Amino acid sequence: MLRVGVIGTGVMGSGHARYITEHVSDAEVIALSDIDLNRANQLATQIKTPQLVTNNVNEIFTSELVDAVIIASPDDLHVNHLRLAIAAEKPTLCEKPIATTIEEARNIAKEISDFQTKAGKELIHFGFMRRFDPQYRKVRELVNSGKFGAPLFIRVVTRNVASTGVTDNGLYTNIAIHDFDIFRWMFNSDFVQVESHYPKRNSLSQSGLSDPLIITAKLANGIMMIADIVAFNNYGYDARFEILCEKGSIEVGIFGDVITRLNFEATPILGGHLADNWMARFELAYIEEIKAWVNSTNARVVNKDLATTDDALAANEACELGVNSIQAAPW
């Protein structure tokens, strides 16, 4: 039984804790840490298994109760918490991003690489859960089948209901970063070009934010991605994408339905009630990712689809291309 400590008990941390408790038979949440101790205690009462609840993150890494750690703290704390993971030499799954700036990302990636080389094994992985989403995996299978022809470009929609506190740079490192990782994974090719574009500003977005953001990007293999990233859409969580190929198209809809258009036939598109965030849409992806991480940690055989430090850094490098392209918005 893998005893897991979870750092952060907000949306992500509480989600991970519940998924382990409800769906992972060979792991349990043994410890929780949050600066808001009341929130951590409430979660502990709900899931019942924690023996340690603290507002001191160091205790999670030093406690003999804890075998492995999930970092689900705010983005700007990831680097500090990753350094604690290195010092403790404990298997760790850290939510994306690896860091909020490219300088920090490169530095901590080097520190992790040196640590893992010395340890002789991979101990730190990163939370890019879409790799484990059944629909994304189905699309990769369909693309690789060849029956749709060669892929040409990707059309992406990623629209949050309300990303309070997000910055212009954060539209990349907190939201679009998932798209950079999943299509790099799907096509085994790095992003080499990213450009930012700004349509009319949403008057309902938080003050000073350049929202929405339109991204045009290109992979080294020539496939182009066109994405609209929205921090405040005010109508419900909306994540979709379509891959246009030479003979047809493959799309994943809002509700995870795989929609194909081939040989003059189109499959139906689902409709329904929209959620207020991404957790419901990607619940199964999170569960499968955690299962893969737990199994890899217990068996000491790494699942090839778990995001590595190199993968996390590559996603940040793609974000940096976009950040460097940001121009003063025309409002």
Image (cartoon, grey):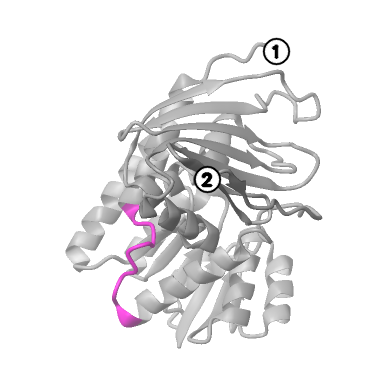
Query: Spatial distance from mark 1 to mark 2, Cα to Cα?
Result: 45 Å
CB of mark 1 within 8 Å of CB of mark 2? no
Foreground of the two, 128 or 217: 217
Residue 248, image x, y percentages: 50, 41
Instruction: Identify the residue at horizontal 38%, vertical 55% (top origin).
Output: 145
Question: Element under label 1?
Answer: loop
Residue 74, image x, y percentages: 57, 51
Q: Is residue 305 magenta?
A: yes
State the residue position of label 1. 331
Instruction: Say if residue 58 shows up in the picture.
Output: no
State the residue position of label 2. 263
Q: Is residue 47 magenta?
A: no
Instruction: Say if residue 210 shows up in the picture.
Output: yes
Q: Is residue 223 above or below residue 186?
A: above
Indicate left or right for 300 with 328 as reference: left
User: Which dot, 1 or 2, sits closer to the camera?
Assistant: 2
Instruction: Identify the residue at horizontal 29%, vertical 77% (top origin).
Output: 300
Instruction: Identify the residue at horizontal 80%, vertical 39% (top origin).
Output: 234
Q: Residues within 10 Å of mark 1 (few under 14, many from 20)?
A: few
Residue 88, image x, y percentages: 35, 68
The residue range painted magenta reads 299-309
Amino acid found under the numbered disc labelled 2? Asn
Residue 263, image x, y percentages: 52, 45
Q: Quadrant of the C terminus?
A: top right
Amino acid found under the numbered disc labelled 1? Trp
Instruction: Identify the residue at horizontal 64%, vertical 66% (top origin).
Output: 15
Indicate left or right for 54 with 305 as reference: right
